[in-house]
Image (cartoon, rainbow, N blue to C red):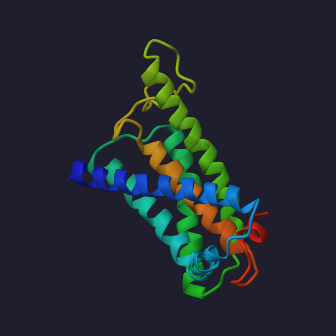
Amino acid sequence: MTESITALLAILTIAGNITIVLALALWIITRFRKLNFLDPILAFIKNHAIIVLFLIPASAIFGSLFYEFYAKFQPCFLCWWQRIFMYPQAILAGAALAYQTRDIIKYLIPFSILGALTSALHYANQIHTRLNPLADPLVACAPGAASCSGVYVFYYGYITIPLMTLTAFLLLLIVALIAREKRTSGDSVRQLLG
């Protein structure tokens, strides 16, 4: 079962990576020209942002708990920090869904930024240790604790659990930045992000 869940999460991570690259490319392109065809996509994201902002961290919570309690992967120091930045987002977005409000979106952005930075550090630590097994890790964990450079999952030559989490944080950040904009559909991406 661990292999099946990990394969699914790896595929979702690839889809998220593609989405992030496309969003970045479209943002760069729209800095130079107006692209009206994106307006319906942006309107869709704005209209369904709270649902997406709930589903992404809820999936990440499921993944982290599955790996810890079913697969018996011990979370390290950096794993715990990523959880600290991810778990409240599901609670806040769930509350926003229940109360039918969008006021929490601005509070999710700092969580996503700090979580993305922590995930990026964790991923860099893993890749550094993988490429230089004899070198000291970038981040040393407490003696006897789970190693921050340990790699439980390595799919498609680059996907690890911290990269899955980094992808989730970046997607949350993109959706939150789009959703917090108060302009209506018909505005260009350039006006939105420029």
Residue drawn where x is 35% and y is 37% of the image: 154
Tell me residue 22's x, y (percent). 56, 57
Q: Is residue 65 visible?
A: no
Residue drawn where x is 61% and y is 76% of the image: 37
Tell me the quarter of the picture where residue 179 sits. Answer: bottom right
Query: Horizontal placement of 128 versus 4: left or right?
Result: right
Query: Horizontal placement of 19 versus 181: left or right?
Result: left
Q: Nearer the viewer, residue 144 or 183?
A: 183
Tell me residue 90's x, y (percent). 53, 68
Q: Is residue 157 visible?
A: yes
Tell me residue 57's x, y (percent). 50, 63
Where 63 falls versus 53 (above or below)? above
Where 158 falls versus 5 (above or below)? above
Name the outermost residue toward the bottom: 100
Query: Horizontal placement of 114 versus 15: left or right?
Result: right
Name the outermost residue toward the front: 33
Q: Nearer the viewer, residue 8 or 23?
A: 23
Where 8 falls versus 72 (above or below)? below
Residue drawn where x is 41% and y is 37% of the image: 158
